[in-house]
């Protein structure tokens, strides 16, 4: 019997995903110094699209030069990056996979040695040396996220995801500890999330009716409050401007650190929200990421209320995970450690393999 995960998934806008499997936006350090797409990164991503992922998402791609978070990062901040982006979107789309570029700005997590200047943050941050953005600069940041979305649409991507997780700049604005601003972008949750809602509204105004827009959030860690993120997720869905939510849980199956939800798994808690439906009755789906490895794990998050699994490390290990499951319902993915040669066969460049070597126990030395 075929898994329901292999059935199509329709978002409120755009093309239907041919299945429910989504490639996580994975840091890989494979792009060129100027942020243009490299052949290595093109190969890595198109192999996953060819391997049957219903949605193929780029790594975090920075929307300002000053927002770069790591060496070899893909950029979406300049028109010189358009040719590579266009080639990538075209080749992903040709496989039938839905193409999504993740829009990112590292904020206070931008290394000085990479960006060559002082990093920026919602408020002055003594720990990282980042300086506070002025109100005008916040509005410029919003405009640059929007311009990046317009650029990605021009390149042919089906849509974009706004990276509001993992302690990067949107997440920094959402944090009540990092964000100590006294203007309209600080204070209450409404103010701390204002720039995110402004980005969404402007992208909707400047991009086409079928352009897909998703948002990634972290419900815990990075100064996030689980109750606030649940509220924010619901608010984002209720706007009608969001086509999917991507909740990065790190471990879908662990209990929440908040005693209010003691005894419930994190995936159950974050998915216990209402999904808005459009006039055609289409829901805004919620996907989750975090220690989903075996097909049974993917089935488990669906049973807990998620609409789709987002695969990270196991997608590094199997570029064709969905195709393998379609061919064999008893498919069991390999587990680390694996050899460098194995990873090279899965489309990882030497730079990406070296990056994965930072993860304890991932590579067999």
Image (spheres, grey):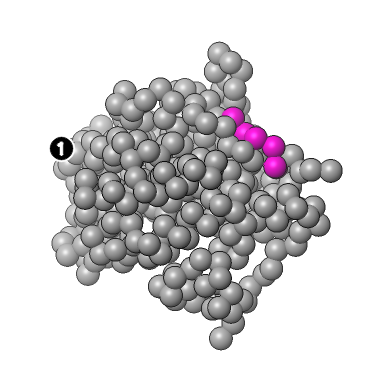
Q: Is residue 127 or residue 157 the one in the foreground?
A: 157
Residue bearing the label numbered 1: 136
Quadrant location of residue 108? bottom left
Q: Residue at x 32, y 33 (%)?
A: 199
Picture coordinates of residue 236, whole percent (x, y): 46, 30
Which quadrant: the N terminus?
top right
Q: Can see residue 216?
A: no
Is residue 8 on the magenta stretch? yes
- Return the residue found at the far right: 1
311 in relation to 227, above or below: below
Numbered range of the magenta stretch: 5-10
Is residue 81 on the magenta stretch? no
**249 with respect to 214 (left or right):** right
Q: Residue at x 40, y 49 (%)?
A: 88
**259 with respect to 158 (left or right):** right
- Return the residue found at the far top: 279
Q: Residue at x 60, y 65 (%)?
A: 317
- Return the residue found at the far bottom: 365
Quadrant location of residue 2? top right
Picture coordinates of residue 121, whole percent (x, y): 26, 51
Picture coordinates of residue 261, whole percent (x, y): 65, 44
Q: Can see residue 239?
A: yes
Q: Is residue 29 or residue 179 the one in the foreground?
A: 29
Magenta stretch, main secondary structure class: loop
Q: Residue at x 65, y 35 (%)?
A: 8
Picture coordinates of residue 133, whole percent (x, y): 19, 46
């Amino acid at each position: 019997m075929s898994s329901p995960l292999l059935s199509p998934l329709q978002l409120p806008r755009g093309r239907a995903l041919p299945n429910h499997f989504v490639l996580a936006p994975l840091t890989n350090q494979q792009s060129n110094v100027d942020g243009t797409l490299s052949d290595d990164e093109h190969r890595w991503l198109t192999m996953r699209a060819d391997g049957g992922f219903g949605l193929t998402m780029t790594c975090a791609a920075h929307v300002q030069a000053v927002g770069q978070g790591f060496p070899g990062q893909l950029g979406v901040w300049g028109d010189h990056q358009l040719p590579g982006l266009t080639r990538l979107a075209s080749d992903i789309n040709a496989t039938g996979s839905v193409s999504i570029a993740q829009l990112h700005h590292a904020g206070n997590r931008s290394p000085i040695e990479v960006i060559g200047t002082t990093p920026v943050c919602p408020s002055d941050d003594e720990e990282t040396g980042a300086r506070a953005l002025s109100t005008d600069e916040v509005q410029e940041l919003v405009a640059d996220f929007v311009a990046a979305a317009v650029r990605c649409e021009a390149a042919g991507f089906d849509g974009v995801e706004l990276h509001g997780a993992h302690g990067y700049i949107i997440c920094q604005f959402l944090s009540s500890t990092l964000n100590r601003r006294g203007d309209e972008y600080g204070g209450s949750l409404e103010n701390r999330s204002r720039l995110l809602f402004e980005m969404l509204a402007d992208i909707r105004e400047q991009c086409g009716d079928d352009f897909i827009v998703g948002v990634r959030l972290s419900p815990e860690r990075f100064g996030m409050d689980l109750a606030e993120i649940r509220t924010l997720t619901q608010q984002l869905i209720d706007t009608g401007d969001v086509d999917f939510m991507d909740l990065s849980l790190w471990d879908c199956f662990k209990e929440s650190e908040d005693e209010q939800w003691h005894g419930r798994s994190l995936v159950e808690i974050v998915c216990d929200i209402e999904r808005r439906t459009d006039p055609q009755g289409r829901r805004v789906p919620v996907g989750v990421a975090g220690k989903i490895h075996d097909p049974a794990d993917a089935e488990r998050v669906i049973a807990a209320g998620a609409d789709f699994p987002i695969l990270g490390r196991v997608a590094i290990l199997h570029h064709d995970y969905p195709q393998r499951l379609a061919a064999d319902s008893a498919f069991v993915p390999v587990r680390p450690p694996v050899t460098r040669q194995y990873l090279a066969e899965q489309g990882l460049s030497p730079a990406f393999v070296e990056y994965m070597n930072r993860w304890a126990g991932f590579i067999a030395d």
